[in-house]
Image (cartoon, rainbow, N blue to C red):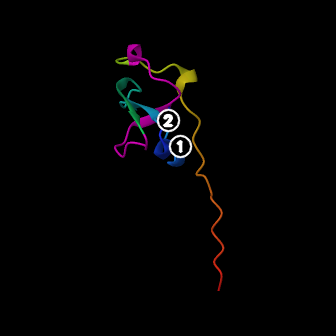
Amino acid sequence: MMSLWSLLAPRRTMRRYALLDAAGVCRALREAQSAPTQPGWVEVEEICPSWLGRTLPNHTLALPRQPVSRPGSALAA
């Protein structure tokens, strides 16, 4: 059974990233809640260890995510 906290807390989804070198070869894979800050990381739809040392298949790159705009709360004056 889920705890009350897990029901109320916002869910943070893990996103998947691949580190590409200058030639487009995959050098590392990572799952994280936010994008890595170092250059070369691209978001992918899935992680497959067999990509290490190879170029990524074209279908694996994730579409860029648009920032979610949340309406501001109305404050009473």
Sequence-first tag of 2 and 1 = 2
Mark 2 is on which residue type? Met
Residue 29 in the figure: left or right of residue 72:
left
Judging by the rendered image, the residue that carries numbered circle 2 is 2
Q: Is residue 58 above or below residue 1?
A: above
Residue 51 is situated, as x and y percent measured from the top left of the image, at 41, 17
Residue located farthest toward the bottom when viewing the structure as drawn:
77
Residue 11 in the figure: left or right of residue 38:
right
In the structure shown, which secondary structural element does the residue marked by tag 1 occupy? Answer: helix
Q: Is residue 59 above or below residue 16?
A: above
In the structure shown, which secondary structural element does the residue marked by tag 2 occupy? Answer: loop
Secondary structure that dominates the magenta span: loop
Judge by depth and name the residue closer to the eye, 49 or 70: 70
Q: Do callouts 2 and 1 mark residues in contact (Cβ within 8 Å)? A: yes
Place residue 22 in its image quadrant: top left
Residue 2 is situated, as x and y percent measured from the top left of the image, at 50, 35
Judging by the rendered image, the residue that carries numbered circle 1 is 7
Q: Which residues are magenta?
A: 33-51
Quarter of the image for the C terminus: give it: bottom right
Say which residue appears at 50% left-offset and 24% top-offset.
Answer: 46
Say which residue appears at 58% left-offset and 43% top-offset.
Answer: 65
Magenta segment: does it hold 70?
Answer: no
Mark 1 is on which residue type? Leu
Q: Is residue 58 above or below residue 70?
A: above
Judge by depth and name the residue closer to the eye, 6 or 38: 6
Residue located farthest toward the front when viewing the structure as drawn:
1
